[in-house]
Image (cartoon, helix red, strand yellow):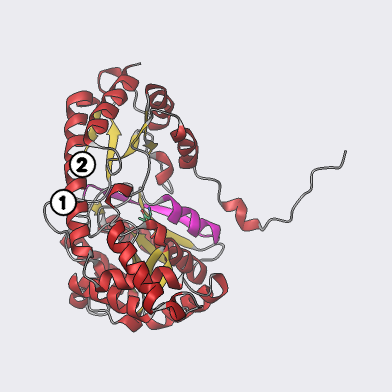
């Protein structure tokens, strides 16, 4: 027998592994499982009719551009629409100051590629977006968690870590974070920007959920607040995404950064995908120009706010003291902690298979920590299950906790 071939994989692959979350996803295909596991928006909320209209327009009126290669920086009509979206939220950004990326995931990859290298350090929140941790590790960075609470990252602790580790950058999801659901207070936002200037340290603001608020809009983005903190715009990279507010299938995100950083990111993007799908960009540009996003957002906020409330109530009623969480003010997730009250299980990874056996899936929280994982945590998405399924899924979770 021939020996199995041995391929010359790059050393950097040794820094990452397939995410533990994927293991949960493999089980989701089972019939009858209610899933709180995904990070997806609800596909029933896609504004299909208006996206179809925008796609027809792209083919009827813009085929020469929409079906052709395009500028690496992005399709100018979309860049203009995205700049207008950010302006409407208080940030002063011109179209030339942002580039379109293939999802905001690509923006994170470009940040890693342009700034990280073996031996460098990066600070993130504990917990944070797993694919960001993995992406930075792939480029060799040592990723360190800064403590966060229900109001986001703690600026005092963050400053001490910056002084100790001199990171290449600090990666934050200040609004309705994934998975933590927390929102950084206005006061902490100002302090983070002041820290960035004082320590000449780049902050990456990842903001895919900021528009998905429930009762009231969140504080302005770090990007918007740079106008109040002198010098801070030089130290901020802001990433946005249409995935959670329009469609993840379009794979459209964007990034705005100081000009020298943006130029390097564009160069790396050229070697990666040359340009983000011109067709997808034309469709999104037409959709946004037609003014449909406002209504789609209103629908999404209403549906997610109701589901978040239903899940929160059901958790209180069915799990009582065995679970603790801060009700989210927006986004797609409830981040919860098993308290162990009454002798109940207090380990998310141990609860997950019991929950699957009862017919409900969620994601254990520990993998979302770059360092010092908290085993008792879990992430529950309320985005895709209907209200009855949410109540039933929580009842199953309560059963799993008792068996
Ligand atoms: N950042 C965060 C915090 C996310 O939760 C996600 C997707 N779940 C992304 C970035 C990537 O999103 P996309 O590439 O679809 O824009």
- Above or below residue 266? Residue 121 is above
Residue at (47%, 75%) from the top-left corner? 265
Task: Judge whether 212 appears above or below 29 on screen.
Answer: below
**Dot 1, crowdedness within 10 Å: few (<14), some or many (≥20)?**
many
- Give the quadrant of the C terminus: top left
Was residue 144 drawn as part of the magenta stretch in this picture?
Answer: yes
Residue 363 lies left or right of residue 331; in this view the side is: right
Q: Residue 357 carries which label?
A: none
Write the start and end of the magenta stretch as one range: 130-150
Rendering quadrant holding ligand 1: bottom left
Q: Which residue is located at x 25 percent, y 67 percent? A: 222
10 Å crowding of disc 2: few (<14), some (14-19), many (20+): many
- Asked if labels 2 and 1 touch by Cβ distance under 8 angstroms, the answer is yes
Q: Is residue 62 above or below residue 243?
A: below
Which residue, given by chain and number where applicable, does mark 1 sit on? Answer: 214
> Which corner quadrant of the image does residue 226 belong to?
bottom left
Q: Locate residue 50, reporting x and y percent.
A: 28, 63
Residue identified by numbered label 2: 308
Q: In this view, does 64 lie above or below 367?
A: below
């Amino acid at each position: 027998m021939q020996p199995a071939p041995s391929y010359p994989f790059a050393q950097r692959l040794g820094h990452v592994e397939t995410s533990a979350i994927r293991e949960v996803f493999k089980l989701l295909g089972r019939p009858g499982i209610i899933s709180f596991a995904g990070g997806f928006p609800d596909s029933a909320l896609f504004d299909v009719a208006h996206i179809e209209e925008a796609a027809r327009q792209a083919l009827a009126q813009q085929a020469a551009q929409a079906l052709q290669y395009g500028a690496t920086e992005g399709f100018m009509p979309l860049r203009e629409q995205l700049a207008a979206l950010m302006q409407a939220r208080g940030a002063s950004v011109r179209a030339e100051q942002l580039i379109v990326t293939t999802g905001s995931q690509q923006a994170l990859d470009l940040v890693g590629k342009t700034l990280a290298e073996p031996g460098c350090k990066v600070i993130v929140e504990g917990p944070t977006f797993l694919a960001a941790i993995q992406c930075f590790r792939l480029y060799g960075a040592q990723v360190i968690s800064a403590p966060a609470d229900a109001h986001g990252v703690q600026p005092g602790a963050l400053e001490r870590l910056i002084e100790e580790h001199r990171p290449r950058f600090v990666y934050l999801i200040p609004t309705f974070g994934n998975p933590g659901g927390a929102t950084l207070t206005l006061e902490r936002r100002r302090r983070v920007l002041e820290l960035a200037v004082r320590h000449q340290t780049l902050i990456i603001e990842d903001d895919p959920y900021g528009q998905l608020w429930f009762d009231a809009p969140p504080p302005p983005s770090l990007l918007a607040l740079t106008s109040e903190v002198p010098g801070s715009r030089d130290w901020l990279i802001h990433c946005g995404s249409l995935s959670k507010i329009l469609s993840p299938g379009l794979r459209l995100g964007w990034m705005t950064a100081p000009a020298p950083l943006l130029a390097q990111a564009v160069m790396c993007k050229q070697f990666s995908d040359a340009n983000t799908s011109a067709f997808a960009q034309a469709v999104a540009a037409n959709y946004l120009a037609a003014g449909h996003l406002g209504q789609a957002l209103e629908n999404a906020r209403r549906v997610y706010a109701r589901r978040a409330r239903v899940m929160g109530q059901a958790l209180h009623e069915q799990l009582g003291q065995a679970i603790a969480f801060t009700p989210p003010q927006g986004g797609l997730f409830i981040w919860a902690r098993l308290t162990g009250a009454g002798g109940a299980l207090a380990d998310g990874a141990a609860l997950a298979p019991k929950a699957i056996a009862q017919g409900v899936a969620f994601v254990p929280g520990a993998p979302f920590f770059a360092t010092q994982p908290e085993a008792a945590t879990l992430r529950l998405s309320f985005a895709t299950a209907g209200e009855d399924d949410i109540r039933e899924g929580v009842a199953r979770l309560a059963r799993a906790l008792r068996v």
